[in-house]
Image (tube, grey):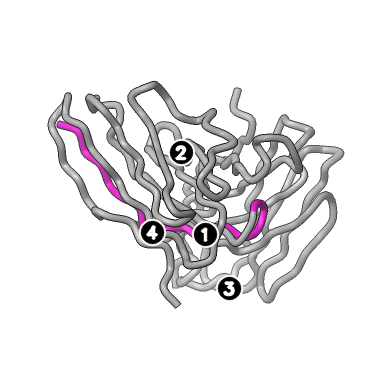
Amino acid sequence: GAGVSQSPSNKVTEKGKDVELRCDPISGHTALYWYRQSLGQGLEFLIYFQGNSAPDKSGLPSDRFSAERTGGSVSTLTIQRTQQEDSAVYLCASSFGVLEEQYFGPGTRLTVT
Amino acid sequence: QKEVEQDPGPLSVPEGAIVSLNCTYSNSAFQYFMWYRQYSRKGPELLMYTYSSGNKEDGRFTAQVDKSSKYISLFIRDSQPSDSATYLCAMSVAGGTSYGKLTFGQGTILTVHP
């Protein structure tokens, strides 16, 4: 079956613009996670959803970052007023339930110029 | 200090060698331990998943967890060039609002040369 998909695969944006990153989880997976991977910081947790609610938003680096999930399926990560330090690969993962195996998507490579 | 420490390498070994990858951690609440493999420009894929202390074997891979020392290891036997990738350890607590959140090590870059 289809895995986790993310779009776009690459995004180049100018500093100060807003961007939206999309994640389509595996069908039937109730938990969805966002992580960020950068050279200096490694792979960092941002937020996770159980259904449409987000029990843990502790990893969001600032109030410029927000995420939502609708219909227990697709999720969107929005970064407002992008900064150069936001440049990274944004990875989405989903799992059947919390603490079940997390399946990762290929990521969105964001470059802020 | 990071909650999870992992030597970034790089590590270069000949084909057929036994590879040992390690992570240490400071949070005693971690109960679930994982190893992921990540190829260049791909998402991580799960290799091994263990709960609490002990060993787990799957083919050429063996995962060990020593909670008393806060130390986990992944051994790869008969390493192959196709094992060349970045290996990431990851951990999670067992309850609370952070249940399910993975904390990753920095990743070790492994190259197996023919």
Query: Is residue A56 left or right of B52 when viewed as pictured?
Result: left
Span colored in magenta: A98-113
Circle 3 is placed at which residue position? B16
The tag earlier along the polypeptide, 2 or 4, is 4
Circle 3 Cα neighbour tier, 10 Å, few/some/many (<14 / 14–19 / ≥20): some
Amino acid on which the number 2 mark rests in the picture: Gly
Q: Residue at x 29, y 32 (%)?
A: A79
Query: Is residue B68 left or right of B44 when viewed as pictured?
Result: right
Q: Decide which of B23, A48 is in the foreground and name it.
A: A48
Q: Nearer the viewer, mark 1 or mark 3?
A: 1
Determine the chain carrying the residue at label 3.
Answer: B
Circle 2 Cα neighbour tier, 10 Å, few/some/many (<14 / 14–19 / ≥20): some
| Disc 1 from disc 3: Cα separation | 18 Å
| Disc 2 from disc 4: Cα separation | 23 Å
| Disc 1 from disc 4: Cα separation | 22 Å
What is the secondary structure assignment of the residue under circle 4? strand
User: As displayed, is residue A61 above or below residue B105?
Assistant: above
Q: Residue at x 45, y 44 (%)?
A: A34
| Disc 2 from disc 1: Cα separation | 14 Å
Circle 1 Cα neighbour tier, 10 Å, few/some/many (<14 / 14–19 / ≥20): many
User: As displayed, is residue B76 above or below residue A46?
Assistant: below
User: As displayed, is residue A63 above or below residue A45?
Assistant: above
Query: Is residue B76 left or right of A67 when viewed as pictured?
Result: right
Amino acid on which the number 4 mark rests in the picture: Asp
